[in-house]
Amino acid sequence: MTEAAARADFSFVRYAQCWEDADILLEALDVGEGDTCLSIASAGDNSLSLLSRNPARVIAVDMNPAQLACLALRVAAYRALEHDELLQLVGSRECGDREALYRRCRTALDGEVRAFWDARPELVRAGIGSAGKFERYFEVFRTRVVPWIHPRRRVDRLLEGGGLEERRRFYARSWDNRRWRLLFRVFFSRFVMGRMGRDPAFFRYVEGSVAERILSRARHALTELDPAANPYLQWILTGRHTTALPHALRRENFDAIRENLDRLEWHPMSIEQLLASEPGLRFDGFNLSDIFEYMSDESFHQLLATLVGRARHGARFAYWNMLVPRSRPPELAHALVPDGRLAERLHRQDKAFFYSRFVVETVKAGAASHPAGAASHPPGRSAPEREGAPK
């Protein structure tokens, strides 16, 4: 990701939430007790979700200190708040005094993170889940674009969901009108998204129509998936979570995440810097978000090969393609096996619907290097036991 860092501005909160579906991530990585996971931090939600599976260690990295401030505040909130209060601080639920909740978390923050949030009380008051540039982009869509297309009652009806055929009929008859298609294509164009949502540098390797691909995926999310069970769609259209929550915010996962917080660490650095700082470090799972989209083919191949060399056998890689196709190159065929059926099935379930592809790949036995004396995999959990692993 150092290639993207040379062009993009990482001085502010770009993503105040993880816009990747942790449900499919966890199934893809099949994290087990005793595993060590590498995770792109982003806002922290998915790194926290990994803790629910009792790994030995989750190492989150991000080159943007603002993103790590989001993760650090979430960790403090899990320690200091109860579940309902966490939802209020994030913005999933209404709250009369989020600053009071923040003060209870504040003492658990280090000096730099405390200074970051102390200087931004307006972000705390609005809910920390809305603090990013990407979330503000969706806010503009929700408040300024959608009202030109659909009245509030129609949006509410969409989010009620229903059976598959009912959803398809509603989309065809009530939602998919000419204005929806026109304004969607404009708002999610490369030009608008690059200025309001993502950094223009992130489109360096994108070819073809951005809006058409996202429109197709939106149609899938509004028909083939149930909007009533989709927290990402709900936030985009309402600015909060209504009838569904992301994995890390669900009540049933709260205690497990809280109990394992000491197994999470985060570092303000690139993946390459982390690997150089701990040459003996080996991983069982890799949550790589969509970082490969932001680099050239050559840089992608080089980093992926480096990570394979730092994986235990049977380790899983999970990452998303949004607009740039990235998957195992031919020169790594001896070491890395695509789990195509698993990946396609999970992609069809992906509630963070704007990604064009989900990639799952497994390290072959004997392909990864290991430090002297290290076991190739934690006892009691061999790679062939995982769905899609090479037999």
Image (cartoon, rainbow, N blue to C red):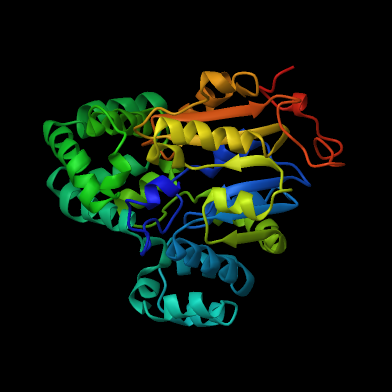
> From the viewer's perspective, is residue 125 above or below residue 263?
below
Please name the residue shown 34% across and 30% down the image: 217
Residue 88, compared with residue 56, is above or below; it is below
Residue 124 placement, left or right of 155:
right
Q: Closer to the camera, 219 or 366?
A: 366
Residue 289 located left or right of residue 227: right
Can residue 195 be spotted in the picture? yes
Residue 290, visible in the rendered structure: no
Q: Quadrant of residue 74?
A: bottom right
Q: Position of residue 60 (x, y in %)?
A: 58, 54
Q: Residue at x 53, y 25 (%)?
A: 328
Give the position of the C terminus as an image quadrant. top right
Left or right, 386 with respect to 233, comes to right
Q: Quadrant of residue 28?
A: top right
Q: Image point 36% across, 31% down: which residue?
A: 324
Q: Estimate the x, y position of residue 156 in percent, counting from the top left.
A: 30, 47
Viewer-proximal residue among 103 and 5: 5
On the rendered structure, is 105 left or right of 385?
left
Q: Position of residue 325 (x, y in %)?
A: 40, 27
Above or below for 322 versus 247: above
